[in-house]
Image (cartoon, rainbow, N blue to C red):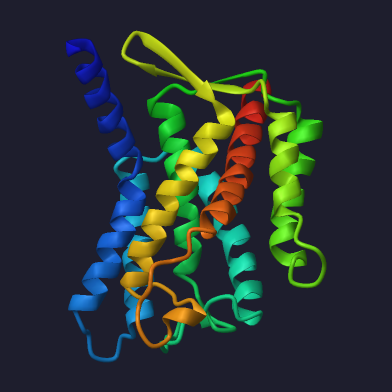
Amino acid sequence: MRLLLKQLCVFTYHAAMSCIFPVGIFLTLALSKLLTIPGLPRYDFILAGCILLQLFMYVSKLETKDELKVICVFHLIGIALELFKVHMGSWSYPEEGFSKLYGVPLYSGFMYASVASFICQAWRRLELSLDAYPPIGITVPFGVSIYLNFFTHHFIFDVRYLLIILLCILFYRSKVGFKLGQISYAMPLSLSFLCIGFFIWIAENMATYLDAWRYPNQDHSWHFVHPSKIVAWFLLVIVSFVIVAELKRLKTKQ
C-alpha cells in the first residue's frame, strides 16, 4: 500500500507538470473575466496571455525545441478546424476582438496546442513506449480519416462510430508503457485515448463556463457540454497522438 501511494504521488506529479500549459490557459481565461483593460478586447487579452505562456514554457526549458515545433503544427490544424466549425455554426465566439479571423480568435489555436503540449510533456516525463503499435501506413491514413470526418460529417454520413470500431481492430494489441521511477507499467492504448478524452471534456466544461467559446445551447445561459462530446475528443486525441508518435518515430530514425 505504501508503494502504491508513493507511485500514485509520482504519477500525479508528472501528470500535473504535463498540464502546465493547459492550466496556464485556464488561468488566463479566468483572469480575463476579472480584469478589464480599456481598449483591449478580452479575446486579445487571452491571446497575449497565451503567447507569453508559450514563451515562458520555451525559455524556462519546460518545453523543448522539438516540442515547440509539434505545437506549432497543432496551431495550424486547430485553426483550420475552428474556421470550418464556426462557419458551420457548431460553436461561436460572440465577443469582439482585433485578433479574430473570420469569426475565430487566434487564441483558439493555443487550446488545441495545449493538448499537444500535454502529450509531449507526458511522453518525456513518463518515458512513454509503445508496444505493438501499427506501422505508419496504417496510423497516418487512419488519423487523416478521423480528422477529415470532422469536416465531412456535415455533408455526408458521420462515420465516427465506424472509425471507433476500426480503432478497436487496428489497435487491439497496442499498449502504451510508462515508467514511475524504476517501475514500468502498461495499459491498452485505446483506453488511454478514452481517459484523456474524458478529462478534456471536463476541461471543455470549465472553458465554456469561462466563455472561451459557446455552443448554440449556451447562448442565453451556461449548460454542461453534452457527454457525446467525449467521443469527439476521444477521436481528436487519437489524431493528436498519431502526429506526435509519428514525429517521434521519424526523429529516432534521423
Residue at the image point whose x is 80% and y is 72% from the top: 155
Q: What is the quadrant of residue 118 in the picture?
A: top left
How many labels were placed on the picture? 0
Residue ID at (46%, 40%): 195
Quadrant of residue 94 within the rendered picture: bottom left
Q: x%, y% of residue 70?
A: 55, 45
* Image quadrant assignment for residue 5: top left
Q: Is residue 9 left or right of residue 90?
A: left
The answer to whether 149 is drawn above or below residue 103 in the figure is: above
Residue at 38%, 88% (x, y): give it.
220
Q: Position of residue 9 (x, y in %)?
A: 22, 25
Outermost residue on the top side: it is: 182
Asked if residue 57 is positioned above or below residue 176 in the image, the reply reads below
Q: Residue at x 50, y 22 (%)?
A: 187
Q: Position of residue 124 (x, y in %)?
A: 43, 28
Of the 4 image quadrants, the one containing the N terminus is: top left
If the image is split into quadrants, where does the C terminus sit? top right
**Residue 175 located left or right of residue 205:** right
5 left or right of 240 in image:
left
Q: Relative to the observer, which residue lies in front, 139 or 55?
A: 139
Q: Nearer the viewer, residue 35 or 3?
A: 3
- Residue 18 at x, y percent in the picture: 35, 39
